[in-house]
Amino acid sequence: MTYQKWCDEFAKKHAAIISKLEGKSTEAIIKYFDYDNMKKQEPTFCLLYAENKKCHDMKHLNCYLCACPHFRFDDGGIKKKGEKTLYSFCSIHHKNGAVFESDHALHQDCSNCIVPHKESFIKKLFDKKWNNIMKDTSYGGNHKEKGDEKNIN
Ligand code: SF4
């Protein structure tokens, strides 16, 4: 599955839950997306729930964003770096980010970064429409048109 397809599917699942929570406060909506609650109330939202696993080993993991608004990707490739193609990077170069390298590709590795899973971060960027929060993540077009190459390592 491409990252864009994953985003499209996630946005739909997210919107379905938001419509169920109509009338609830921002705080209550964010709390609803707490990993432990989601596992009980929305067991099919994430494949990890059934295995009792978390994507990140942290207390109070929140699934509201799942992805990160600082992530930048282009499924078609952002640029060539030597023989390899860079597909994604972190726009803030977070110290806990890393690069996953295969024979032909470079991908951002966020496995040690918990930024988008913290309630405080979600509160700051809160929008009921997940796509609004993630609007800058798709690198294709948008950023290329702006010539915003300075954020790529
Ligand atoms: S944040 Fe982690 S546990 Fe929660 S839905 Fe996303 S992948 Fe699953």
Image: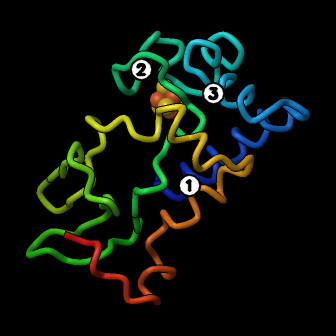
Which amino acid, mark 2?
A: Lys
> Which label's residue is closer to the chain start, 2 or 1?
1
- Give me the residue at 10% from left, 73% from top: 83
- Name the residue that disc number 3 marks: 45
Vertical placement of residue 45 versus 116, above or below = above
The secondary structure type at the circle numbered 2 is loop
Q: Is mark 3 within 8 Å of ligand 1?
A: yes
- Number of the label disc, if any, that sits on residue 5: 1
Q: Mark 2, residues whose alpha carbon is within 10 Å: few (<14), some, or many (≥20)?
A: some
What secondary structure is found at the residue carrying circle 3?
loop
* Image position of 35 (left or right of 9): left
Q: Disc 1 vs disc 3: which is toward the camera?
A: 3
Front-lying residue, 152 or 92: 92
> Measuring 49% from the left and 82% from the top, which residue is drawn there?
141
**Tag 2 residue:** 54
Give the distance between the C-alpha atoms of the residues marked 2 and 1, in whole angstroms.
22 Å
Mark 3 surroundings within 10 Å by alpha-carbon count, few (fewer than 14), some (14 through 19), many (20 or more): some
Q: Give the mark, 2 or 3, whose residue is nearer the N terminus.
A: 3
Which residue: 89% across, 34% down? 22
Instruction: Pinpoint residue 119: horizontal percent, then vertical percent.
Output: 54, 31
Q: Horizontal placement of 108 versus 43: left or right?
A: left
C-beta proximity under 8 Å, tags 2 and 3:
no
Q: Amino acid at mark 3?
A: Phe
